[in-house]
């Protein structure tokens, strides 16, 4: 059995479900390749009384065939091919009845449930009937459903208004690894990389376990990137489209949003996105944005003016693989060994600076811990001036209950960051503009978030606090 990296809270909740004295209905969801199936397989190996996996992009007949094959794998004979999902799950109920009534703990796992819903076949209704009419009556049943199509899972299961309404006992979104979990994963596979190298790998692959599994420890990071993206085999070149085809039945509208946000360094409001996409700022756009947020592909940052405004939120692309792909791969032609030939060029350095800002946004809890304010009530958000031209923006602001606000400036560098007068004046100007425009009566503390710290100098002593790369690796 392979060791499960991270996922401590998820493991704790799954163990609690196993030990509970009631029927448990567990729903996992999260983007493709994030490790949902691996987690369940490792936790419940050899405990399944039935397990079926939907066929991604398969037709309805493919789904029924997969279901029948799973029945045979677990020793159940199907008298006939089911004509619909209601009949299929009724057959499953009768097949499992004897084993369930024996009293042993029975784990039923339906993986990639959204795929089973091919051609609008109402698998959610059948699952609801299976649970409500039978499975929920037995304290020894753990019924687990899982799906990469997060929007489908949210709409048809988590927020269901039908038979599955309020039936889930354990809701479990599975998120990408943090930097610390990525380090632990690479350590388990005998990588000898510095934290700077792990950070750069995270910039390319994000915390997606499957992508990280494709890395070779005997190669440098540069060699790995060239092999996976720029060689003749280019194993990862087709992953971008596969990702969205898996998540959404009509992926093009979602890809358009991702591409628009991929071109924006600071992010966009809904109104700005609608204008860029030449589409209406209506409920359809709002639903797509919500779907992308649920999949950990984009981030919704609330903004502050005189008050906190959630409707004027700024959306940013936060899926690091997609950002890398759109920056370097989504071109008509890219030379082989591109990464080796262009490393340390202005283009790549600029991308690293932007990506480090977004990695810091994904590690706010670690930043709060480093600042020793993790026990203080805080609100984190971004800010964009509506007065200055061009609009000043602060990507990370931590507003604290102790009447202090951390104005965070993120800087990526290979060594210690040299804070000069020009840059310090810019930071102060943005900080002052923020206080004046918002009217916030908090003391502004300038916080530098760097990789290797701020070099000693005239202006380093004028900042109130620092966070370094090592701090982002906190548990």
Image (cartoon, helix red, strand yellow):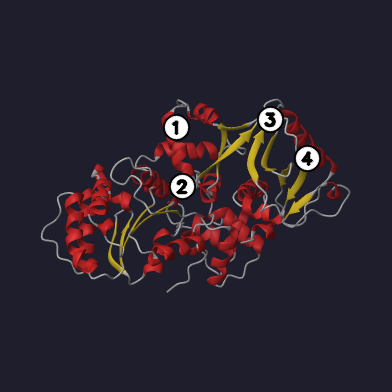
Name the residue tied to disc 3.
Answer: 385
Q: Quote the CA–CA distance across marks 2 and 4.
A: 36 Å
Tell me where residue 408 sits by quadrant.
top right
Q: Quote the CA–CA distance across marks 1 and 3.
A: 25 Å
Q: Quote the CA–CA distance across marks 3 and 4.
A: 19 Å
Name the residue tied to disc 4.
Answer: 443
User: SS for tag 4?
Assistant: strand
Q: Residue furthest front?
A: 21
Locate the C terminus and report the quarter of the image it occupies.
Answer: bottom right
**Marked residue nearer the N-terminal end (1 or 3):** 1
**Marked residue nearer the N-terminal end (3 or 2):** 2
Name the residue tied to disc 2.
Answer: 295
Name the residue tied to disc 1.
Answer: 285
Mark 1 crowd level (few <14, some 14–19, many ≥20, 10 Å Cα): some
Badge 1 vs badge 4, beta-carbon distance below 8 Å: no
Badge 1 vs badge 3, beta-carbon distance below 8 Å: no
Q: Horizontal placement of 268 versus 49: left or right?
A: right
| Numbered disc total | 4
Q: Quote the CA–CA distance across marks 3 and 2.
A: 29 Å
Vertically, is 179 above or below 262?
A: below
Mark 4 crowd level (few <14, some 14–19, many ≥20, 10 Å Cα): some
User: SS for tag 1?
Assistant: helix
Residue 445 coordinates in the image, percent (x, y): 77, 44
Badge 3 vs badge 2, beta-carbon distance below 8 Å: no
Badge 2 vs badge 4, beta-carbon distance below 8 Å: no
Q: Quote the CA–CA distance across marks 2 and 1.
A: 16 Å
């Amino acid at each position: 059995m392979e060791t499960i990296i991270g996922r401590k809270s998820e493991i704790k909740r799954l163990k609690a479900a196993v030990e509970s004295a009631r029927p448990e209905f567990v729903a996992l969801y999260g983007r493709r390749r994030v490790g949902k199936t691996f987690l369940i397989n490792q936790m419940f190996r050899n405990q399944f009384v039935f397990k079926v996996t939907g066929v991604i992009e398969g037709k309805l007949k493919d789904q029924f065939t997969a279901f029948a094959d799973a029945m045979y794998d677990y020793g159940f004979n199907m008298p006939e091919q089911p004509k619909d999902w209601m009949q299929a799950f009724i057959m499953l109920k009768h097949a499992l009845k004897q084993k369930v009534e024996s009293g042993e703990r029975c784990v039923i796992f339906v993986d990639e449930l959204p795929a089973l819903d091919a051609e609008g076949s109402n698998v959610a209704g059948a699952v609801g009937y299976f649970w409500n009419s039978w499975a929920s009556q037995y304290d020894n049943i753990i019924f687990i459903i899982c799906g990469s199509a997060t929007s489908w899972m949210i709409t048809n299961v988590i927020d269901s208004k039908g038979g599955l309404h309020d039936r889930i006992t354990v809701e479990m979104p599975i998120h990408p690894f943090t930097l610390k979990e990525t380090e632990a994963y690479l350590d388990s596979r005998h990588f000898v990389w510095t934290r700077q190298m792990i950070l750069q790998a995270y910039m390319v692959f994000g915390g997606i376990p499957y992508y990280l599994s494709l890395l070779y420890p005997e190669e440098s990071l540069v060699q790995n990137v060239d092999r996976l993206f720029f060689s003749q085999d280019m194993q990862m070149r087709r992953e971008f489209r596969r990702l969205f085809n898996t998540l959404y039945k009509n992926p093009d509208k979602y890809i358009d949003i991702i591409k628009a946000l991929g071109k924006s360094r600071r992010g966009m409001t809904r109104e700005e996105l609608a204008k860029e996409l030449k589409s209406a700022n209506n409920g359809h756009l709002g639903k797509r944005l919500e779907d992308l947020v649920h999949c950990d592909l984009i981030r919704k940052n609330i903004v502050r003016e005189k008050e906190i405004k959630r409707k004027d939120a700024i959306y940013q692309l936060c899926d690091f693989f997609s950002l890398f792909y759109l920056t370097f791969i989504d071109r008509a032609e890219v030379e082989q060994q591109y990464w080796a030939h262009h490393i340390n060029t202005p283009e790549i350095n600029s991308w690293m600076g932007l990506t480090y800002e977004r990695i810091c946004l994904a590690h706010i809890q670690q930043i709060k811990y480093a600042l020793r304010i993790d026990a203080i009530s805080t609100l984190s958000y971004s800010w964009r001036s509506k007065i200055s031209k061009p609009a000043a923006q602060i990507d990370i602001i931590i507003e604290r209950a102790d009447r202090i606000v951390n104005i965070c400036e993120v800087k990526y560098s290979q060594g210690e960051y040299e804070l000069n007068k020009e840059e310090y004046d810019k930071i102060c100007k943005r900080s002052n503009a923020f206080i004046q425009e918002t009217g916030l009566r908090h003391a502004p503390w300038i916080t530098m978030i760097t990789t290797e710290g701020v070099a000693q100098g005239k202006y380093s002593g004028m900042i109130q606090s620092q966070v370094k790369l090592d701090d982002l690796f906190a548990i």
